[in-house]
Image (spheres, coloured by chain):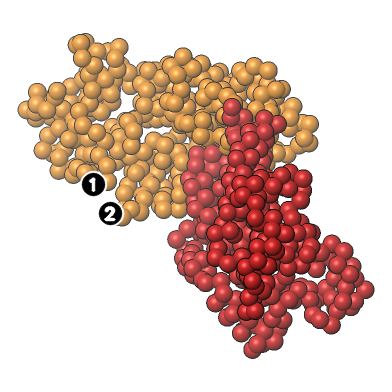
Chain colours: A orange, B red
C-alpha cells in the first residue's frame, strides 16, 4: 500500500451558475522518497485537488473520493481535529506566493516555532534551537538574527526559504509544493528547486510538485500526472512522458517548450482551459485538440482509462483507427 | 520609533494652532456677549457695558486678544470663567473624570460586545447570526441618541424601576471625591451600598453612549476580519494544522486589529468630546454638559479653553492610536 493514495477525487464548487466541477476523478499515489509532479495549465485543478487533500478548501467546496488514505488513515472520515494533527506535521504544503503566505505581523522565528510547538512541543530554548537549525538548513545566512526579522524585511526568495523551513519543521512524510517558484526570479527559481530536491532526498520525503513548467518536471520528477480542466489526462514516468507522450494535450504541452521549437515563432496551444460556462461536450480537450473527431466532440472518454483519450498517441500519431481526416485541420 | 513619534508630533503643532483659532473665533461669532447675558432682562447701559467689557479685556483689538489667549495656553493659563470665577483649567479638571468614567465604560462596553460579535459574524458569514447582527447594528447606528436614552429610561427606570434616572450617585450617600472617578471613590468609601449605587447610575448612560460605537466596532471588525480571512497567510496558518482559535484569534485577528484599533481610537476621541447629548439626558456632570452651559452663557474663556483642552485630548488619543499601530503592525514602524 502506498504512503498516500487518492482514488477518484472530485471537487465541486457551488456557484451562482450551478455546480462547477473543478477536479474530476483524479488519482494520486505516492510512496516514501518519491517525487510526483502534477502538470497542467492554470485552471486545470492542480492546486484545488491538493488543497482538498489538506482540507483547506472553503466550505462551498464539495469533496468526494473513493479513497483518500494516508499511512493507513482514512482522510475522508476523520474529524477536523484529527486532520489538524496530520497537516502541518506529516503532510505539509508550500504555497505559490511567499510574500503573502507569511503573516506580516509576526517574526519568521515565531511562525516557525509556532508549528513545532503545535505538533511536537518543546521548551522555548529547544524551539529556538530547532528554528535556527531549520533556517540554516534552507540556506538562510546568519539564521540567529533572521529569526527576529519580519517577512517584509526579506526578499521573496528568502521568504520562500522560510516557508520551506516552516513546512519541513516537523519532518513531514509528504511535502506538497504548489508552484513554489512561480512568483520568484528565474535565478532564484533554480536555487529553490535545487533546495527542495536536496531536502526531499535527505529527509526521504515523498513530494508532490505542482507546476506548469515542463522544464522543471524534466529536472526533478520521477512520475508525472498531467491534468487538464480538472481531469487527469495522462500518468507516466518522466522518461516515458517526454519520449512518448500518449495524450494529445501532453504532446502539445511538450511541443510548446521553447527548446523544442523548430520555427521562429514559439509554438502554443490555441485557446484556453474551459471555465464554468464554456464546457464542451465530449472530451474536454476537443476544441483545442488537433486530432479531434466527431466522436471526441460527442462522447467523453472513460475517466478510468490510463490515457484519457479515444485515440492515444503513439509516436505522435493517433491510434485506435483514428479516421485521420482532421489531422491537418485546426492546427495553427 | 523615536523618529516615528517625532514626525507625528510635528503634524500636531499646526493642527493645534488651527484648533485654537477656531475655538477663539467661533464663540465670538455667536450673537450676544457675556455681559448682555449676565444683565438679562434688566439690560445694561452702554457706558456700563463698555466698562465691564473693558474690565474683561474685550476692548482690545481682536488679534491682541487671540495672542494673549495663545500666550496664556503656553503658560498653562486658560483664563477665568465669568460664571464661576474659577480658573477654566480647574473647572475642566473637576468635571473631566466624570466624562472619562462614562466614556471609558461606554467604549469598554462597545468593544467587549462589538469585537467578538464582529469576529463571529465574519467567521459565520451569511449565517442567521451574521444577518441579525448586521441588522441590529444598522439600527443601533441610526438610532437618535436622545430618543434611545428616553426609551431606556422609560423601560428600566420608570416601568421596571431597576436603574436611577440621573446623576452619578444617589443623594443618600455623601462620599469624599478623591479621584473624581465615582466608581473608585465609592468603592473605597465607608458608605455601604455607595459602589452599587454608582454602578447602577452608570448602566444606562453607558449603554446609550456606547450604542453607536458598538455598532461601528461590530461592523468594522466584521469587514476587517472578512478581508483578512481571505488572505494567503490565513491559509498558511490552517496548513500548519493550528486550531481554529489560533488561526482566527491570533493570525487573522492581529491583522484585522489594525483597522479595528483605529476605529476604537477614533471613537474614544468622539466619546470624550461628544458625550454632550448623553450627559444632558442623564444630568451627568461632565465636560459635555459644562460646555453646553458655557456656550449658553457666552462664557468666552470657558468655551475656548474647554474646546482647546478637549481637542488636545483627542489629538493625544490619536497619537496613542498611531503608536499602537506600530506595535500591532511592524510594517508601519519599519517604513522609512
Q: Quadrant of residue B282?
A: bottom right
Above or below, A190 relative to B175: above
Percent position of residue B150, x then y: 59, 80
Write the residue at 54% across / 43% down: B234
Percent position of residue B57, x then y: 69, 55
Q: How many marks?
A: 2
Percent position of residue A247, x then y: 26, 28
Which numbered circle lies on residue A17? 2
User: In this view, which residue lies farthest toward the right?
Assistant: B190
Secondary structure category for the residue under label 2: loop
Report the side of B95 relative to B324 (left or right): right
Q: Quadrant of residue B277?
A: bottom right
* Label 1 – label 2 distance at C-alpha: 8 Å
**Is residue B244 in sight in this rendering?**
no
Which residue is nearer to you in this view: B5 or A257?
B5
The residue beneath circle 1 is A277
Above or below, B68 relative to A178: below
Secondary structure category for the residue under label 1: loop
Above or below, B311 relative to A271: below
Callouts 1 and 2 on one subunit: yes
Which residue is nearer to you in this view: B49 or B299?
B49
Report the side of A130 relative to B261 (left or right): right
Write the residue at 52% across / 50% down: B224
Sequence order check, earlier mark of 1 and 2? 2
What's the chain of the residue with tag 2?
A
What's the chain of the residue with tag 1?
A
Say which quadrant the C terminus of chain A sits in: top left
Percent position of residue A309, x then y: 23, 34
Contact flag, marks 1 and 2 (Cβ < 8 Å): yes
Amino acid at each position: 500500500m502506498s504512503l498516500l493514495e487518492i482514488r477518484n477525487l472530485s471537487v465541486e464548487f457551488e456557484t451562482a451558475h450551478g455546480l462547477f466541477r473543478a477536479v474530476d476523478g483524479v488519482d494520486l499515489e505516492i510512496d516514501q522518497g518519491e517525487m510526483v509532479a502534477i502538470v497542467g495549465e492554470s485552471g486545470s485543478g492542480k492546486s484545488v485537488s491538493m488543497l482538498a487533500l489538506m482540507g483547506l478548501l472553503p466550505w462551498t467546496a464539495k469533496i468526494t473520493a473513493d479513497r483518500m488514505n494516508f499511512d493507513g488513515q482514512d482522510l475522508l472520515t476523520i474529524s477536523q481535529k484529527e486532520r489538524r494533527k496530520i497537516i502541518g506535521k506529516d503532510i505539509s504544503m508550500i504555497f505559490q506566493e511567499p510574500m503573502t503566505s507569511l503573516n506580516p505581523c509576526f517574526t519568521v522565528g515565531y511562525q516557525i516555532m509556532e508549528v513545532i510547538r503545535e505538533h511536537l512541543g518543546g521548551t522555548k530554548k529547544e524551539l529556538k534551537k530547532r528554528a535556527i537549525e531549520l533556517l540554516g538548513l534552507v540556506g538562510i545566512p546568519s539564521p540567529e538574527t533572521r529569526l527576529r526579522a519580519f517577512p517584509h524585511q526579506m526578499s521573496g526568495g528568502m521568504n520562500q526559504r522560510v516557508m520551506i523551513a516552516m513546512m519541513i519543521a516537523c519532518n513531514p512524510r509528504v511535502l506538497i509544493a504548489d508552484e513554489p517558484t512561480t512568483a520568484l526570479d528565474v535565478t532564484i527559481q533554480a536555487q529553490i528547486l535545487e533546495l527542495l530536491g536536496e531536502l526531499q532526498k535527505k529527509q526521504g520525503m515523498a513530494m508532490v510538485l505542482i507546476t506548469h513548467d515542463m522544464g522543471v518536471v524534466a529536472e526533478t520528477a520521477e512520475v508525472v500526472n498531467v491534468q487538464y480542466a480538472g481531469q487527469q489526462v495522462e500518468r507516466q514516468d518522466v522518461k516515458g512522458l517526454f519520449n512518448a507522450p500518449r495524450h494529445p494535450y501532453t504532446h502539445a504541452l511538450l511541443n510548446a517548450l521553447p527548446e523544442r521549437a523548430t520555427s521562429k515563432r514559439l509554438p502554443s496551444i490555441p485557446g484556453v482551459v474551459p471555465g464554468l460556462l464554456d464546457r464542451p461536450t465530449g472530451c474536454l480537450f476537443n476544441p483545442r485538440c488537433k486530432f479531434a473527431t466527431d466522436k471526441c466532440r460527442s462522447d467523453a472518454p472513460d475517466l478510468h482509462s490510463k490515457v484519457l483519450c479515444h485515440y492515444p498517441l503513439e509516436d505522435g500519431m493517433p491510434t485506435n483507427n483514428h479516421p485521420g481526416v482532421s489531422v491537418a485541420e485546426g492546427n495553427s | 520609533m523615536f523618529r516615528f513619534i517625532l514626525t507625528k508630533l510635528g503634524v500636531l503643532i499646526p493642527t493645534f494652532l488651527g484648533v485654537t483659532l477656531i475655538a477663539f473665533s467661533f464663540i465670538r461669532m455667536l450673537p450676544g456677549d457675556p455681559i448682555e447675558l449676565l444683565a438679562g432682562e434688566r439690560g445694561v447701559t452702554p457706558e456700563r457695558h463698555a466698562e465691564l467689557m473693558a474690565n474683561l479685556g474685550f476692548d482690545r483689538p481682536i488679534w491682541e486678544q487671540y495672542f494673549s489667549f495663545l500666550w496664556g495656553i503656553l503658560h498653562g493659563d486658560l483664563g477665568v470663567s465669568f460664571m464661576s470665577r474659577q480658573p477654566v483649567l480647574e473647572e475642566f479638571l473637576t468635571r473631566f473624570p466624570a466624562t472619562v468614567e462614562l466614556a471609558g465604560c461606554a467604549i469598554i462596553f462597545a468593544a467587549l460586545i462589538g469585537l467578538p460579535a464582529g469576529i463571529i459574524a465574519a467567521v459565520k458569514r451569511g449565517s442567521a447570526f451574521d444577518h441579525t447582527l448586521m441588522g441590529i447594528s444598522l439600527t443601533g447606528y441610526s438610532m437618535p441618541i436622545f430618543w434611545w436614552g428616553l426609551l431606556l429610561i422609560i423601560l428600566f427606570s420608570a416601568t421596571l424601576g431597576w436603574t436611577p434616572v440621573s446623576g452619578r450617585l444617589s443623594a443618600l450617600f455623601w462620599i469624599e471625591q478623591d479621584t473624581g472617578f465615582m466608581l473608585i471613590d465609592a468603592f473605597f468609601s465607608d458608605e455601604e451600598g455607595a459602589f452599587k449605587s454608582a454602578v447602577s447610575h452608570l448602566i444606562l448612560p453607558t449603554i446609550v453612549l456606547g450604542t453607536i460605537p458598538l455598532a461601528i466596532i461590530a461592523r468594522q471588525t466584521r469587514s476587517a476580519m472578512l478581508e483578512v480571512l481571505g488572505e494567503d497567510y490565513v491559509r498558511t496558518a490552517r496548513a500548519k494544522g493550528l486550531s481554529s482559535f489560533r488561526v482566527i484569534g491570533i493570525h487573522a485577528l492581529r491583522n484585522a486589529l489594525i483597522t479595528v484599533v483605529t476605529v476604537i481610537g477614533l471613537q474614544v476621541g468622539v466619546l470624550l468630546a461628544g458625550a454632550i447629548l448623553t450627559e444632558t439626558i442623564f444630568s451627568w456632570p461632565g465636560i459635555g454638559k459644562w460646555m453646553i452651559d458655557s456656550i449658553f452663557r457666552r462664557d468666552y474663556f470657558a468655551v475656548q479653553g474647554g474646546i482647546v483642552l478637549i481637542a488636545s485630548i483627542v489629538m493625544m488619543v490619536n497619537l496613542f492610536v498611531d503608536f499602537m499601530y506600530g506595535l500591532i503592525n511592524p510594517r508601519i514602524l519599519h517604513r522609512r
